[in-house]
Structure formats: C-alpha cells, structure tokens
Image (cartoon, rainbow, N blue to C red):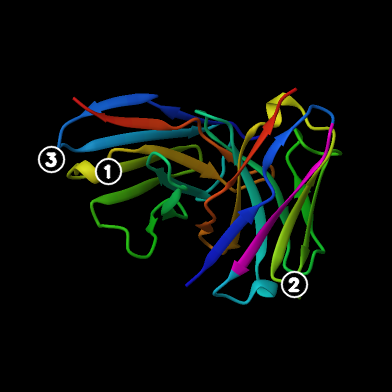
Amino acid sequence: EVQLVESGGGLVQPGRSLKLSCVASGFTFSNYGMNWIRQAPGKGLEWVAYISSGSSYIYYAETVKGRFTISRDNAKNTLYLQMTSLRSEDTALYYCARHDYPEWFAYWGQGTLVTVSS
Amino acid sequence: ETVMTQSPTSMSTSIGERVTLNCKASQSVGINVDWYQQTPGQSPKLLIYGASNRHTGVPDRFTGSGFGRDFTLTISNMEAEDLAVYYCLQYGSIPYTFGAGTKLELK
C-alpha cells in the first residue's frame, strides 16, 4: 500500500525557516517524481514544487521560487521542503504527492500544517 | 500561467440528481486535466485523469470529458458520499494549476 507521511509543520514567525519531510513507503520511491502541494485554511489547492526521481529536474511555483527548496534522499525514501523567509501567506496544510503518469497526483499524504504568525 | 476557472462555485443538489461541473482553461491544455474530490478533513482524491479516464476504483457515475479549454465532470446519479469540493487541475504546462473548486451541497 502506498503511504506518504508528512511531518515538520508547526508555528513559525515571519521571516524564519522550517523544513518539512515526507516519508514514503509501499513503492519504490527512487522511481517516482514527487510534489509538494499546499492548501491555505478554507482555500483551494496550490501546487508548490516538483522534483524528478533522480533530482535532475526541479520546478517551483513563482510564489515560492527563491525561498523554498525541494530535495529528496532516495536512500531514506524521504522528500523534503526547506522553507525560508516565511510569510503569513505561506500558512497552509502542506501535502506531498507522488507524481504518476498519466494520472499525475494519484497518491497524497495527509498533510502537515504550517502556521506563519508572530 | 494557465488559469483554470471552475463554475459554479457552489451547487445545491439532491440525491439521485445529475450534476455537471465545469472547468475552463485560459489557454489550450489538450487533455492534460485531472479532477479531484475533497471531503472535509481529507486529502484530495483523484477521480479522473487525462480529461476522461476514471482512476482505479472510481464509480462509473463519474464521467469526465473535454479537450483544449473546456472540461466537464458529470456525476450521473448523485449520492450522499459525493458531497464534497471538486477541483480541476491542468498539467499541460508548468506551473501546474488548480481551479478554485466547486462545492456540492444538499438542497
């Protein structure tokens, strides 16, 4: 069974940093691209970042480019999102999602909540 | 960036009713559209990929159609478990973009 478990969320002050993790199980992690997708409280979904299976291709939404860094450790079956210069508008539930083809986001974790507030 | 505009924003429905949700892309995305269902407190679930293909385990009352800029999700026989927010997603170009969602409620 495919499982994605996010962690690392919490309350952080504006301008500070936070690193999220997503541990994958139930599939060969190194064969799949991965994504981070977020959802502000009571709002819709926003794609944040993508990383290919071997980390060769990385893409970001304009809203986080230059502040967030997506990375992965295939030996640890773990996806990361390093978030710096956090803003109140980054407050959201952050999901990791496996990148499938042709389905795109067939598997999602339960999310980890990031709250940016002073 | 391709903007995905969903309509209506919300819809009051009845059990057994046929429901049609719409999604319009600001530029052509071919068939590179998915539909996701999200119930309160849950992660989104994939329903339809490639505009018209049902994901594994999705009931056949869900049907997707469309090409280019205009896409539709139809629920042929509304059930109580279908009360949710539905999002379309385009992956024809980066950044991948979601519509704002359509919320289905009971009349």
Which residue is depicted at the point 66% across and 46% down?
B93
Please name whichever residue, A22 or B65, is drawn nearer the observer in this view of the structure: A22
Same chain for the residues at labels 3 and 1, yes or no? Answer: yes
Mark 3 or mark 1, which has the lower sequence index?
Answer: 3
Image location (x, y in percent) of residue A36: 66, 49
Residue bearing the label numbered 3: B16
Image location (x, y in percent) of residue B45: 43, 51
Q: Mark 1 near mark 2, Cβ–Cβ under 8 Å?
A: no
Find the magenta span and give its range.
Answer: A16-24
Mark 1 belongs to chain: B
Distance (Cα) linking label 2 and label 3: 47 Å
Q: In the figure, is residue B57 to the left or right of B1? A: left
Mark 2 belongs to chain: A
Residue bearing the label numbered 2: A74
Quadrant (top left, top right, bottom left, bottom right) of the C terminus of chain B: top left
User: Label 3: few (<14), some or many (≥20) within 10 Å?
Assistant: few
Same chain for the residues at labels 1 and 2, yes or no? Answer: no
Q: What residue type is labelled 2?
A: Asn
Residue bearing the label numbered 1: B82
